[in-house]
Image (tube, rainbow, N blue to C red):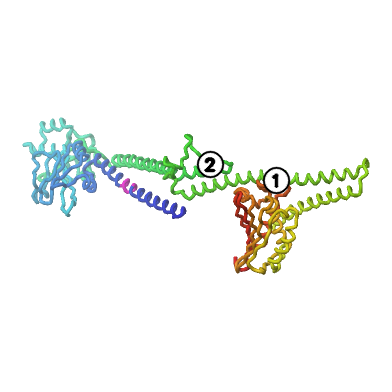
Amino acid sequence: MSLSKRLTLHFVLHFILMLCFILLFILGSFVFLSLLILESEMKSDFSRMSEEYLDLAITIKNDKAVINENIKESIQKKGGWLQVVDSKGYVIGEYNTPKELPKRYSFTDILSMDLNNFRIHYWILEKENSSEVTIIYGEPLKSKQILNTLLRSNSFPNINADFKEYLVKNDAWIQIYDASGNVVYSYHAPPNLKFTYTEILSMKKRPWNSKVDISSYYFKEKDRIFLVGTYNPYYSPDHITDSIISASFLKSFLIVFGTLIVFAIIISIWYGKKFGKPLLYMMKWINNMSKGNFMEPKDKKGRVPILNKKGSLHKRYKIFKEVVDSLYTLSKTLQQNEENQRRMEKTREEWITGLSHDLKTPLSSLYGFSALLASNQYQWSSEEIMEMGRIMKEKAVYMSELIEDLNLTYRLKNNALPINKEKTDIVSLIKEFLSTFSTTTEAKDKEIYFESGQDTIFLEIDLKWFMRILDNLLTNAVKYNKPRTKIKVKVESNHQRTIISIEDNGIGMDEETVKNLFNRYYRGRNTQDNDSGSGLGMAIAHQLVVAHGGEIVVESQKHVGTIIKVVFYHKNDV
């Protein structure tokens, strides 16, 4: 799988996992906030508890109700009690219940339930298998206890001294209202206290919003309402409860938000280590390479971070395997290029030094002979003058050829040399060239012969530059080999290509010489016996072959010999 596809797949999977985690976290946070708010509401006033919270807090196991500890704590705090009744009326769970409460309720018991000393609240829960359970919650009602004491006394409806003392002792009060809502009797009540019927109904409907706890009794005979009131121990008005819930919500929100921040930091650190650290390391490596340091960066302990103890790629970097491999390749290539550049510079300096020597030697001869001729201290004979002229001409020709070679190689390099091809029989051409070349001074001590399996081979060439190719290659073969070296020029052709091979059994070349043979500035290691060359001959031959659309292949082995194959491809075959 390619790097782009692997990174895409990696990020998509991470994004999906992150999205799922965030959605689950948000869902869990909502549940957590809801439970916390419901719990805060329960602690404030259990009678306002929602069915949803009770459904979670009370579970049924083996026909027995298990009550959450938070519910028990809240009931205990309020001094109340709780029973769980199944659909058949059986009590399957209870907490803090008075002894007089039954263990089983009939149809009429549930509907007519009115305990003297408690305020009753009901919740209906639907459990597993569609079975219903009824939650009965009762909380002590002091005002009702006092009212019941009055109703059970022999003096009722009169208020005697004993009851007045009982009221004072319990910090309670009593008021009697007529049909018009006027207070006809009041004892131990706050001054100017008078309720409207709407206030009384509101206190009965939402007792937690009132500072006083009231219980009433209608005395039908005199059309009077007896109202007993005490301090409300369950006073928890809506705004206070809302404040508690808001505080709980804010606290929960801060917890959730803080958790998200911590999660974001952890994910950032994780992503930084998984993706950022490898990227920074590779950027550092690239930066080092731009400064000439091609080795992979190391940590403070001198270790290469991208490799594990076994020397293989660390799992953190495996996703960037192609990039790391490319960096290694680039590093190696740049290293080789730098080495080649240094070798090239050294070779160029050596070549310039040799070329300067090649120019300086004939110039010295020209200068010396010209100085002698210009001197009047000696009378030169005509033979001496002719000899000096011949040498001066020879040196001038050599310098001219050297300069021409320099000009030619740069024209070839810049594709500025016109190649005018014409169809020519190269078999007869090479035979004629060899017959002349063999008579040269340097070639006289070599055995040169020609071989061809065909009498005529026609090839489209530029005659002048083709002859230059042959001359340069054969000159190199005879110049740097020992006497009696056998040199064979072989020509073979088929419908695809024509190959001209120059084979010798001479001293051969090492690998470095073969590698740099066509370098413009290179003089082989085998040239110590003859350093008069410019170092351009083989480079020119190679460039001329390329200009003809061909190529040169060199095979050589030390002390065995050399084979140079010049390959010309026929038209429409390459």
Q: Is residue 312 visible?
A: yes
The picture places residue 531, in percent across and down from the top left corner, at 72, 46
Indicate the secondary structure of the residue bearing disc 1.
loop
Quadrant placement of the C terminus = bottom right
The amino acid pointed to by label 2 is Met
Query: Which numbered circle lies on residue 338?
Result: none
In this rendered view, identify the residue nearer to me: 132 or 42.
Answer: 132
Residue 260 placement, left or right of 205: right
The prevailing secondary structure element of the residues shown in magenta is helix
The picture places residue 259, in percent across and down from the top left corner, at 36, 41
Looking at the rendering, the stretch of residues picked out in magenta corresponds to 25-30
In this rendered view, identify the residue nearer to me: 286 or 96.
Answer: 286
> Which residue extends farthest left?
154
The amino acid pointed to by label 1 is Asp
Query: Which numbered circle lies on residue 295?
Result: 2
Q: Is residue 125 above or below residue 265?
A: below
- The 10 Å Cα crowd at callout 2, few under 14, some 14 to 19, many 20 or more, is some
Magenta segment includes 199: no
In this rendered view, identify the residue nearer to me: 131 or 227.
Answer: 131
Residue 570 placement, left or right of 28: right
- The 10 Å Cα crowd at callout 1, few under 14, some 14 to 19, many 20 or more, is few
Q: Is residue 185 visible?
A: no
Cα gap from disc 2 to disc 1, whole angstroms: 41 Å
* Quadrant of residue 267 within the rendered picture: top left
* Quadrant of residue 92 within the rendered picture: top left
Q: Earlier in the sequence, mark 2 or mark 1?
A: 2
* Quadrant of residue 429 within the rendered picture: bottom right
Query: Which numbered circle lies on residue 529?
Result: 1
What residue do we see at 49% from left, 47% from top? Answer: 324
In this rendered view, identify the residue nearer to me: 494 or 260.
Answer: 494
The picture places residue 389, in percent across and down from the top left corner, at 86, 50
Residue 502 placement, left or right of 47: right
